[in-house]
Image (spheres, rainbow, N blue to C red):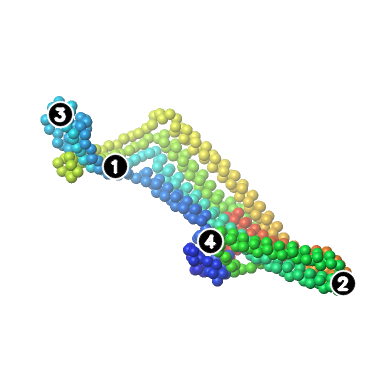
Amino acid sequence: MAGLLIGFSGPAFSQQAAESSPLTLQQAVKIALEKNPLRKVAVADTRVASADISAARSTLMPRLTFSETATRGNDPVYVFGSKLRQQRFTSADFALNTLNTPLPFGNFSTRFGGSWTLFDSFAGWHGVNRAKQMNEAAGHELQRTEQEIVFRVVDSYYGVLLAAKQLEVAGQAMKTSQAIIDRSQARFDSGLVVESDLLTAKVRMATRQQELIRARNNLDLAQAQLSTAMGAPMDSMFQPAEALAERTLPVPVLGEVEKQALAKRPDLKRIQSQEEAQRQSVAMAKSSFGPRVNTFASWEMDNPTFVAGGGGNNWLGGIEVQFDIFEGGAKRAELSRERALQERVTAMKQVASDGVRLEVRRAFYNLDSARQEVEVARAAIAQAQDSLRINRDRYEGGLTTITDLLGAEEATRRSQTDYWEAVYRLHTSYANLELASGTLNLQSPVVTP
């Protein structure tokens, strides 16, 4: 098991590891939930959303800055102010020539500053709440992605099992066709039938050979699809630990499944979180009309050289209240935009709910059809085999034609193919119903042995 979970992280993950340890469906799902790149994308989205919360909270905190500035020049205002800041201003500096045309002067300024928005009409808090809701939405999206990955693995795994059964049926059909050729050859050699019977049997044999070739290729393709769904290298060849067979699965009730879907579907929860986040966006747009209270402070050292000394220092602090009287209507436009987006999300929520109900009903009826098809196909297998046996005996006795015998052989092969396809649809339809209801996971009945 450990080799299956971590062994294919490098190029050493090969067919040898896959063939030495048969893979169960539950193991395949576990590997996919670890390695599938779609899940990695969804996990990255949750990390982005989590970082957005930290970014939104940072707006509520004070901001501290440090700067070191070196300047030199002979601008009169600059020289005058720099000397004052360095506390080196003397009465000689009041001379008109000195004031108007000062000599170049240098200043090294070391400054610590800070600012803090004490009140922004609660826009910052709304921003934090919005980021939290979007983080929840990302979490729900991750859950839905995991469910979709589980369904892909279930579908691909049973696809491999179905392809293996189809290959087995094709092999059996080859043996049956060969037996018919042998009988036809013997009867032709005995002069009991014309050569057309033998040629017809050989034509059917060629058809069965083509079907066998397609069945082999379909199995290879199904294994590649399973590897892709698991996030493994496409060339990996897994040996399923199970064989396609009927399993007893719980019988769902449509009304209960529909209620469960509306309550548990992660994508519906994601839209609900997005709707709440949009409410916070509307509140933020409203807060922009309110006042803002900011504080600021700074402490500065000014020296003639980089090394501290021979200069002066000063500090400054204050508080301000800001209120936008007119800004060209931009804030009203932004508020209208956010309200329109809120209406859009609300409408999409209704669309999504209706879509979920329809998905559940479609999956439920598909499952119900698959159950009934399995029962019909199971009975048809026995009937087709009896028909083939009777027609074989009648052909041996010269009571029927080669056409009737080949028709019975085709019916037998078709009944077996239909049965295994019905069994495949039974399992995948049940998984699809759980996906539609939002309950498909590693412990689902269709996944566990």
Q: Residue at x 11, y 30 (%)?
A: 92
- For badge 4, the amino acid type reads Pro
Q: Which mark is residue 98?
A: 3
Q: Is residue 127 left or right of residue 369?
A: left
Q: Is residue 419 visible?
A: no
Q: Which mark is residue 191?
A: 2
SS under mark 2: loop
Dot 1 corresponds to which residue? 114
| Tag 2–tag 3 contact (CB < 8 Å) | no
Q: Is residue 193 left or right of residue 235?
A: right
| Tag 2–tag 1 contact (CB < 8 Å) | no
| Lower position in the chain sequence, tag 2 or tag 4 | 2
Circle 3 residues within 10 Å: few <14, some 14–19, many ≥20? some
| Lower position in the chain sequence, tag 3 or tag 4 | 3
Q: Residue at x 65, y 66 (%)?
A: 164
Q: Position of residue 116 (x, y in %)?
A: 32, 41
SS under mark 4: loop
SS under mark 1: strand
